[in-house]
Image: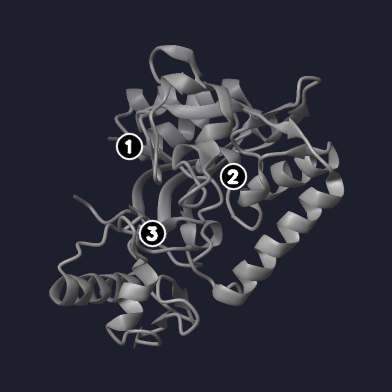
Amino acid sequence: MSVFNAYMTLSGAIDADVLRDERLSRHTTYRIGGPAALFVAAHSYAALARTVAVLAAEHVDWVIIGKGSNLLVSDRGYDGCVITLDDEFSRIAIGDDGSVTVGAGAALSKVVNEALKAGLSGLEFCVGIPGTAGGAISMDAGTRHEWIGRRVRDLVVLRPGEGLHRYQGSDVEWGYRSTSIPTSEIILEATLALEPGSRAEITADMEERLRRRREAQPLGAPSCGSVFRNPPERSAGILVESCGLKGASCGGAQISPEHANFIVNRGGATAADVIALIGRAHDEVLARYGVDLACEVKLLGFGA
């Protein structure tokens, strides 16, 4: 594996920002994480395709991240290449048929706002969810009862070494915080099917959802959102809280006093601090209730 060769080949040769040893704490909502050996912000499809080809030739591992809103990076960082999608991948287009075509790099908040401006309903449940459209689709973001996969009419992915592939939304198995899209494929663009609606009603719905989110979640401190998936018919937050863990801390990390399914960075937290709290919450819930909570936070740089 030669990160240096990849860097020398890509630097200045593609439409992208190519950096060495970029601290990933700058690219995650946790504000935690060591450096990526190589960091590429691809501004076009050509730049992305070339990047992936060079990394394959140099046997460099890579990963796509969006806004880092569901990601915990090791304090040691990541030995491979982190890729983000910018510019060409951030486009949003409103169709005449009530559809919205979005690039994977578009901020989900902007997609929601553009749908509202166009008087299109169907994404109200996404209000307040951080990250990019691509990230939301890859993890089928939403609630227990509403998720973005239901709105995907079709999507385009890059299959490294093969080229572009288009899925119909019905080709994909959408699940709670999961999809059947292979992790080796890169989501580039999706078309969402929405319905005409009243801007006033859409706005009122979104404002109410935001109000409930602000009341229940610790939005003022860096975090990665919900730590555990809710088990069937139960609440992960309530299970952790009932173990007396609200407010428990390790170093600069704390299980939020506001919502026990959030671990927040109170200042200077390390990835090790967060992992310790995740392990403690998981183990105490398992011991008391026999519930094996599944962590929904993506981990990077921790090894096998």
Residue at horizontal 47 percent and vertical 63 percent from the top:
224
SS assignment at label 1: loop
Identify residue type, mark 1: Asp
- Give whichever of discs 2 and 3 has the lower sequence position: 3
Q: Which residue is mark 1?
A: 61
The disc labelled 2 sits on which kind of residue?
Thr
Q: Nearer the viewer, residue 42 or 228?
A: 228
Q: Position of residue 182 (x, y in %)?
A: 35, 28
Element type where label 3 sits in the image: strand
State the CA–CA distance, disc 1 to disc 3. 15 Å
Q: Earlier in the sequence, mark 1 or mark 2?
A: 1
Q: Label 3, on which residue? A: 73
* Circle 1 or circle 3, nearest the eye: 3
Camera-side residue: 242 or 156?
242
Amino acid residing under circle 3: Val
* Label 1 to label 2: alpha-carbon separation: 22 Å
Closer to the chain start, of discs 1 and 3, is 1
Residue at the image position 16 percent from the left and 77 percent from the top: 288
Q: How many numbered circles does the render carry?
A: 3
Placement of 106 over or under 94, stated as above or below: below
